[in-house]
Image: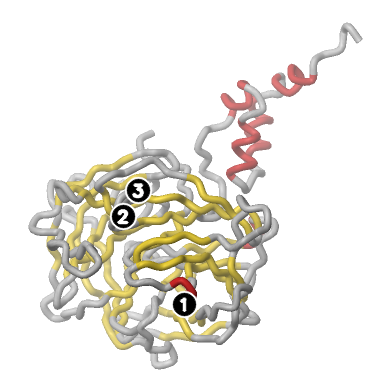
Amino acid sequence: MADEVPRRAMWAGLRSQLVKLTSQFFTSVNDYLRFRAVCKSWRCAVPHRPDHLPTQLPFLLLVSTTEPKIGPAYRLIAASAGNVRSLPNTANMLCIGSSFGWLILLSENDCLINLFNPVTAEDIRLPRLDGPTFADVVPPGDEVVIVVEKAVLSSDPTLDRDFVAVVFMLGVNIRWLTWRHGDESWTANANPDVQLSSGMRDVVPYGNRILCAIYGDNDDWAVLQVDPGPPARATIAAWYAMPSCVPRTKGLTYLVVSAGELLLAAPHDNDNRTANLNITPGYRVFRLEPGGISRPAVAVEVEDIHDRILFLSPSSSVSVSAEDFFGFPGNFIYFVGKDWREKRENRRVWLVVVQSLESGETTVVADSNISDQRPLRWRGRRSDAARWVTPNLRSYNR
């Protein structure tokens, strides 16, 4: 009919208050972005970077000691499928940590540290590290020996301007440097009464300005209290042996903050075979109570994490609720495994593996870019790492 109002005009004519209210019901960033794309008036009514969305599914970022330093990213789009896309090149930068969706990058040329948000492309520049950071290339394998062991942030920079960056250095004993916004240089931290031996397994922010760390073969456990200063400092609040129920292992062990609780995932050989007949080690999960100066740590093994999904990677493990993501069942663990059939000197073929915590069964995640759903596989050096990174949509500079 000639007098019919075009449907597009009807959508565009909705009141901005109603559009904004409707946008608050979205839990997926993809749905939210599609909502904003309907028309110009809707884009003007709701912010580009929302604050109300729950924790999103992480993407897997591949990082290397060779060029390119930052490789492709793997994004889950279904219960057992995903795809790979490229990220902007960050030449001459090593990824030494990831916290709250921010990558902690270290420049080989001048030892400057940058915090980079791969979603918003925002950048926070930190001072250079004093003293040598890299050793010479050592044979065999042309692998670069990195003196920096790990780096972590005490809190989300987009929510807390007094966040503290902590860099842990390799050595006979663990030592660390701290920085906060406003500090002109890094502060060396020391605890003369406690000397933590080298071999940090994992360290994560937990609670209010607290870091929890594990050392050795799951032998020792430490709680560090972060003081924003100025200058920023981190001191050991408690240090003791890991509870005996946690297995001692040389395999990778991960700490995960999940729904307000601190979990530890320790590897064990469950002798379950994946779909391609490779034996893949699974993980046991323990609930940890960090303890304090006069309270030892307590660990209890759990076989059910209910609706939670864990994504394991060094100092950047992620926990999300399955209720927020259709097609992803709870009580599952995602981690990076090895294809043992293609083991070469200094080279590995890596896979993404998902484990049911209830049954212990492990399966290899498929690549959705391939029609016959073959496993997602990529070749890299033994020194390469993969990090699950949670998309952080908040803006630091606004």
Please name the amino acid that badge 2 sits on: Cys
> Mark on residue 95?
2
Q: Earlier in the sequence, mark 1 or mark 3?
A: 3
Q: Which residue is mark 3?
A: 157
CA distance for labels 2 and 1: 23 Å
Q: Earlier in the sequence, mark 3 or mark 2?
A: 2
Q: Of helix, strand and loop, which one carries label 1?
A: strand
Q: Of helix, strand and loop, which one carries label 3?
A: loop
Q: Of helix, strand and loop, which one carries label 2?
A: strand
Does residue 366 appear anywhere in the picture? yes
Q: Which residue is mark 1?
A: 265
Q: Residue furthest left?
A: 131
Query: Which class describes the residues within 10 Å of circle 3: few (<14), some (14-19), or many (20+)?
Result: many
CA distance for labels 1 and 3: 27 Å
Q: Image quadrant of residue 213?
A: bottom left
Please name the amino acid that badge 3 sits on: Pro
Q: Image quadrant of residue 252?
A: bottom left
Q: Residue furthest bottom?
A: 244
Q: Position of residue 201 (x, y in %)?
A: 32, 75
CA distance for labels 3 and 2: 18 Å
At horizontal 18% and vertical 48% (from top left) the residue drawn is 112
Is label 3 or label 2 in front?
Answer: 2
Query: Which class describes the residues within 10 Å of circle 2: few (<14), some (14-19), or many (20+)?
Result: many
